[in-house]
Structure formats: structure tokens, C-alpha cells
Amino acid sequence: MTVLIRGVRLYGEGDAVDVVVDDGQIAAIGPDLDGPDDAETIDARGKILLPGFVDLHTHLREPGREYAEDIETGSAAAALGGYTAVFAMANTDPVADSPVVTDHVWHRGQQVGLVDVHPVGAVTVGLKGTQLTEMGLMAAGVGRVRMFSDDGVCVDDPLIMRRALEYASGLGVLIAQHAEEPRLTVNAVAHEGPNAAKLGLAGWPRSAEESIVARDAILARDAGARVHICHASTAGTVELVRWAKEQGISITAEVTPHHLLLDDARLSSYDGRNRVNPPLREASDAVALRQALADGVIDCVATDHAPHAAHEKTCEFAVARPGMLGLQTALSVVVETMVRPGAMTWRDVARVMSEAPARIVGLPDHGRPLEVGEPANLTVVDPDGTWTVSGADLASRSDNTPYEAMTLPAVVTLTMLRGKVTARDGISPARAGAATRGDS
Ligand code: DOR
Ligand code: ZN
């Protein structure tokens, strides 16, 4: 099947061109191209072509909590958000701590066919923090696990973390740490500061995150290993990552869209949708995170897409499960916080949402340049479009978006995985016929 994308601007730069996609690859780029007679033509005038997005941090809940999300609904959300590859976190039930689970996740993702679902393997058996998993077996399985994390639970024992870094280094895989010193977050539900104090919510101090970031940077230095910091949330974490990079330590970090846009002023509603780990911080932290993303101190954006069912969210704040949907809103939040204010260009968007995450985890076929001969993992965006978020209309099985009723800029109009259309104008094939997303 040949697809002819007409009148699109690569990375939002230069003149509009036509792009021919054939046999899963970019076959030609240039002005006024002709495809074969049976080519499907897509009018993309005024739109921007980017490499398909890569999400290093997605919770798809399969196996075990399919009532909140599964690989099919999560894949549709990813495709609609412009993603061509996602990394599905290991805190499933059973935990993804063996090839039985990680291979299943990969297979199921390929069967659904909307996005490459790469399994993340657990660092420790059952996420219990005491015994390393057989990372080598998971890395060698069909799911080819490239990243390991106990996300949701910090690998807090320094000796276990040290051994994990050493083992991962030998295998050439990545350890991603959810930085949270658990002794400092006992019963914590909200950022420790004036807002939580006023509202009577138990506080989660910045030091819980920063002490682990500092420790892990030093452990990575001494092991000669790489470490990746999940969902950085504080200005202090930014300074520590900056320092570690200056020392030549192999450290990378991601930031979530919600930590770029939202802050703990929202907590006064006691709405469980605002509960997330790490918690929404203060506005000054969000400013530092934006600056760090623009500077490259923080390498990439990762969603921490965390679906939860209604009964797990519409309850007392301290009881609500932490987590927010993110796949379908990530691009719009990045445009709102970074592109609109002039802190980043569309070229930078390609870097932080596609190229850098693919590089961090060593994905060979995503985050590639928009050039002839490259795999056609692509996203077309309408930069002038706007849409109003409605949780009920999102493809996820859950609707816990913190952006309900917000009007956001930028609309994903087309996503392609190896030349196959996986989302178009708010409809993903798996969801064809379902309610479409609002448009400009
Ligand atoms: O808010 C969060 N939700 N943070 C995590 O680390 C885990 C995630 C989840 O699994 O729901
Ligand atoms: Zn986490």
C-alpha cells in the first residue's frame, strides 16, 4: 500500500513537501510528487510531519487490571496521541519479572498492531526489592526487554541498586529508577508544602526524590553504568541531574507532561484525579522542569500514563490511586507549555518526544530522521488545531484525565506504524465507529 502525504512541513521547517510512503518506508520526499494511481492521498497542507513519538513510561495494566486498561485500549490511546512505540511498565499482576509476562506483552502488542509495545522488566522479583530478576532471560526473550524498572516502587536498597546497575551494564540494558526514598513518603499523598499543610494532606518532601537521584548518580558513576530517572518532579532533581551530567556520569531523565503544566495549587478541590506519584509540585518546580527540558538537562518527555477505574479515583483524596492518563494529551501539553511560549521549536518536540527516548533505550527503528529509506513511523500534527479534552471520549478504558474540559493546542491528525495508518483524524482502527475526539 502506497500513501502520499501532500503538502506537509518536515519538523515544521522549510517549504511544504510531499512524502511518499511505500512498503513501510519513506520512499520519496520532494515537491509535487506523484504516487501510483492506487496510492491513498492524504491532504496535509498546513500540517507538520514528525517522527512517531516514543513513550518510555506507560502503564497498560495488562495482565491483571484489564478493567482499567489493556494493551488494545492503551495502544489505541497511544496511536491517537501520535505514538509509534511505548514502554509498558512492569507493575502488572503478575509482575513482569519473567519472560512469560514480558513476551506476552510484546506478542499482544504486535497482535493489536497499533504501536510497538515494548515490555519493561522488573528489576526485582515481585517488585519486592530484595532479589534481582533474571534480566538476561527477559532481554533475550522475544520481547527483547531493553529497560528494567520497579516503577511505582523505588529500588531503595543501595546494594540491590548497585548490583542491578552492574548487571544491566553487562547486558547493555537500562535501569530506570522511580526515585522515592520510602521512609520519607510513609503515608504521603501530596507535595509537602503550604498547600498540603493547609488541606491536611500528608506531605511528600522533595528530598524523598532528590536523595535517591543523588545516590543513584553516584552508584552509576562507580559502576560505570547508565541510570535513567523516571518522572523528575523537582527543581532540585534538575540541579542534581545537571551536576551528574557535568561529571560525565551516564544519567538521563524524563519529565511528565503533568509536571510541566500542573502544580499543587490544584489540590484544594480534593479531586482524586490530581493524585499522582511523584506528586504535583509547586509552580517554581514546573518552571525549572520546563527550562531543563528546553536546555537538554532533562532529556525527554514520558507520559507516566496511569489509567485507574472510576471507583479507584472518585473517592477520598488519600485513598484515590495515584496516576493520570497521559498518552492522548502529551503532545498538546508539551505544545502548551513549551512551544507556545517560545521555549521550544517543533524540531525540539521531535527531539524530546521521539529521538531522545529512542536513543536512551536503544530502539533502532523509531525516532529516526525524516529521510528516504527510513522506516515510516510517523506522526502528522495540525499545529493550529485545538481540542477540548473529555475523559469519556479518550480511547483509554479509564477516564482519569486531569485536563478535563481544558482546551489545548495541537491535534494529531495521522499516525503511521511501518507505513500502516494507526490513527487518523481522531479515529484509531481498533476504535473505528467510537466517539471521535473534538477537533478545531
Ligand atoms: O502516579 C503513579 N502511578 N506513579 C507511579 O509511579 C505508578 C503509577 C501507577 O502504576 O498507577
Ligand atoms: Zn513511577
Image (cartoon, rainbow, N blue to C red):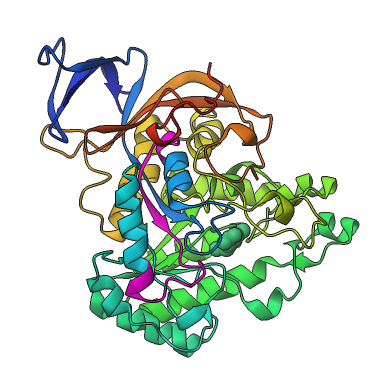
- Where the N terminus falls, by quadrant? top left
Answer with left or right where residue 49 lies relative to residue 73: left
Question: Seen in the image, is 96 located left or right of residue 304?
Answer: left
Say which of 376 and 423 sits in front: 423
At which x and y percent is residue 64?
A: 53, 64
Q: Is residue 228 above or below residue 265?
A: below
What count of labels does the image hold?
Answer: 0
Is residue 340 a member of the stretch shown in magenta? Answer: no
Q: What is the quadrant of residue 29 in the picture?
A: top left
Picture coordinates of residue 389 (x, y %)?
A: 62, 30
> What x and y, as percent, mark residue 291?
52, 45
Task: Give the quadrant of residue 375.
Answer: top left
Ligand 2: image quarter: bottom right
Residue at x 32% of width, y 59% of height? 106
Task: In the rendered view, tell whether residue 298 sits above or below residue 287.
Answer: below
Residues in magenta? 79-101
Name which residue lies at 55% across and 70% down: 179
Q: Percent from the top left, x then y, of residue 275?
A: 71, 55
Residue 36 appears in the figure: yes
Relative height, residue 289 to residue 338 (above, below): below
Residue at 63% across, 53% down: 308
Quadrant location of residue 146? bottom left
Q: Is residue 28 above or below residue 125?
A: above
Viewer-side residue, 278 vs 106? 106
Q: Mark yes or no: residue 147 visible.
A: no
